[in-house]
Amino acid sequence: MGRSLLLLLPCWVLAAAVRADDTPAVDYLRDIKPLLAARCARCHGPSQQQAGLRLDTGHGVNTGGDSGAAVVPGKAAESLLVQAVTGVDGVSKMPPEGEPLTTAEIDRLRRWIDQGALFPADEFVPPAVRQASAHWAFQPLRIVPPPQPRQAVGLRNGIDGFIRARAEELLSEAGTPSPEAAKTTLLRRVHLDLLGLPPPPELVDEFLANDAPDAYERLVDRLLASPAFGERWGRDWLDAARYADSNGFTRDMPRTIWKYRDWVVDALNRNLPFDQFVVEQIAGDLLPHPTLDQRVATGFHRNTLINEEGGTDPEQFRVEAVADRVNTTGAVFLGLTIGCCQCHDHKYDPLTQRDYYQLFAFYNTTAFQPGDPAAPRIDVPTPEQILRGEPQRKQEIRRHIAEMEAALASKKDELQAAQDAWEQSLTEDDKQKLPFNVKNAVDLPKSDRSQVHLRDLAAYFRGLETARQQFPELEQIAALRAAEPKFVSTMVVEEDSRPRPTHIMIRGDFLRPGARVQPDFPAVIGDLGVWSAASADGQNPPRNRLALARWLVSPQQPLTPRVTVNRIWQRYFGRGLVETENDFGTQGEPPTHPELLDWLAGEFLRSGWDVKRLHRLIVTSATYRQASVVRDDLAERDPLNLWLCRQVRLRLDAEQIRDSALMVSGLLTDELGGPPVTPPQPPGVFDFTQDKKPWPTATGRDRYRRAMYTYLWRSSLYPALTVFDFPDPNVTCTRRNRSNTPLQSLTLANDQTFVEFAGGFAARVLRLSANDAANDAANGAANDAANGAANHAANDAANDAANDAANDAANDAANGAANDAARLRAAVKIALAREPHSFETARLLQFLHQQRTAFATQPQAAQQFAAVCGAEADAVEQAAWTAVARVLLNLDEFITRE
């Protein structure tokens, strides 16, 4: 065969025909391709590529899958394909079921790989079948107009048409909706739902006196415009964002990120469209010319835990933080358990490990500094500081400091020796006086100290007078730092200037990198045109977090709008239209009202992602406004109230319980935002944490802030919130548990803060003049009676209350003295937004007299009890009324939304 002819032959034919040894040549098309097609292609072919591996083509075999290359040409023993079919330890045996490959077949594969794993360059490759799913959650939103039920009377919007039609279909005559709730019940319900606070008594009177047909709708608009709306619904979002004021793990050091919390509250109050709300949190820093607020918004993904233990591998916990961001994105926006794919393909949903690490790649480029866990962070000057030019002055001072630090670097060894000598001189008494983070560092062996420990020690030593005398550059640097304008800083997300490649991690192990992947979206949903959408300069958008954010809120992406409206719905009805709100996959529950879910999601999109409009749509529906009374005719046919023929009673969330008690006590500090506060808590809370946490008990206005502003240590949450099912902030929470335990009642009765609130409540009631209390009770009773008569309910109770109030008012006016019954009626109205029934008044009067008599015989106990809130009233009266207030705050009705 001549040289010219040899050049014309494909290399794979040449390799098959010419061997330097006596090993039989292997023909790919004859010997290998049929073998792989028969034994491997069912799981690794064009229609399915488990582990990202395709074995029906030579190119696929050489390219490999999630674990990397399947073959190492010329080295069969090192090839994963051979290791899998021979059953090497640590490699999954293939095929997983059925007859294993014969010795002859394995030998054939070995020889082909040893001979170079050659295949025709022009081999036909059938196109891979795109991963698809018939599961309802992955299908486009359906445009379904609201149906017309048989009982069309009282429909208020499209929600009611879907709910009633479904109830009629499944429950027949039992599908009749419940009547509208009493006005006082409805007022308290919507006030708690929208603001997380009970209505004030004056609003109760105003609402009961307003007979306008749109009075309720106008009330809703008023509540939606309240700054308290952002606080109430912002707390829900912070659950999903796994917000806390500390880093987590056993050391659980403090962090400063409350500016992100305030951004959430402000964004909800100004009704930032939800798509923009998402984009700014995922990638605000990548927007063109990002504002300071947009950079603060990226704190959403800085709520990950930070491990500051000595001896840890920073890369391990960087990877864990990135994984947390992927898992949170999947849960919060997609309602999918995508975290299951960190180690393997999802066992139930059409999600692969490759999908997971392609999402991982979007976040893998974010900046990370092992020596400074809070970095990156930014200063957030106030508008006044900006006007005064303080940011520019700070930059100039920082430049001078950097110059002096550079000069000090030449004395690094001397400085370290001085620091070591100081540390060795410390006595046990000296150590007890150190700041807690410095003491923790000093107590550790040097080999166990992390970069954070070393930084804390060095910073403290440099601030000592002895160090500054020995090293004058430290006097000078300290003086410059003291002259720096002081800004609040907050943790943010930024891109790293150094590209970081992303590999699939075999079995989720960051030490076992597999195939390299690029940022991309789950194949079952597709890119929805994101990659083909040209940017302003004609270039395709970069594969970064901004592309991910825009994909999450793409109008063609069906999961985000469905998941979002479902989460909001569940807050109003106790469960979502999809009960498994964090799992829209095949193992989750299907929607009870699929057409309504899609209609709400569609309305959300068509409104321009208007969040407040969605809330208004729900709370103005007849479905929401129904009474919550349990009906005998539905007890067997719909015991779980799936078909919503009535409203539901819901115990308030932890923060709402505290805030409600604060509100009725008259102590609530009505102030938005600011640093977290430390209200009173029981002693010993930090006894079981590695590091004792500072908790300077707040005084003054900070003592009575809303619960969302309480400092959240991950390792030791505020006990009075935890007992009412406050969620674990270490992971995203999309639905809180609701439990009933004796500890909750004990907390309401005996916890220091709730006793203090009861004292404030008592003082508030005692400040009412007799005439004010009597008139308030009489007017309220008359309104309640009229409302009750209109609803054909509680006529006897209303008449009794009206008669009693009228008599009491007359007596008060005649006597010009305080009246217990009138004050009790005022107290019940403040706490429960309604008038008491006559039997309730009688029981409370009896209890008040008992307490008054008991405290009169125990003046010292009365003084101690009355001193809780610092009231100026008579000690016996204050103590007795505080006892009554404790009863009202401990009622099931007080901590329940009807």
Image: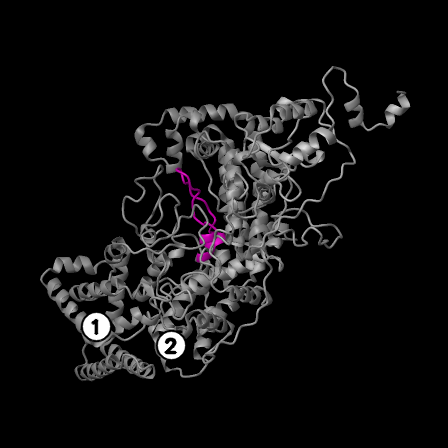
Q: Quadrant of the C terminus?
A: bottom left
Query: Which dot marks residue 179?
Result: 2
Crowd tier of the residue under label 1, counting other residues whose Cα lies within 10 Å: few below 14, some 14–19, many 20 or above: some
Q: What x and y, as percent, mark residue 406?
A: 58, 31
Q: Is residue 540 left or right of residue 374?
A: right
Q: Is residue 449 left or right of residue 546?
A: left
Residue topped by disc 1:
840
Residue 529 sits in quarter: bottom right
Q: Residue at x 26, y 82 (%)?
A: 795
State which region is magenta: 236-261
Q: Is residue 495 above or below residue 824?
A: above
Q: What x and y, as percent, mark residue 730?
A: 43, 45
Task: Residue type at mark 2: give it.
Answer: Pro
Q: Is residue 867 above or below residue 157?
A: above
Q: Nearer the viewer, residue 48 or 711?
A: 48
Q: Nearer the viewer, residue 818 or 94?
A: 94
Let me know if residue 351 is in the magenta part: no
Display colour scheme: one colour
SS label for mark 2:
loop
Task: Residue type at mark 1: give it.
Answer: Glu
Q: Nearer the viewer, residue 185 or 635?
A: 635
Residue 487 visible to the viewer:
no
Q: CA distance from mark 1 to mark 2?
A: 26 Å
Q: What x and y, as percent, mark residue 456?
A: 45, 35
Q: Nearer the viewer, mark 1 or mark 2?
A: 2
Q: Residue at x 45, y 61 (%)?
A: 576
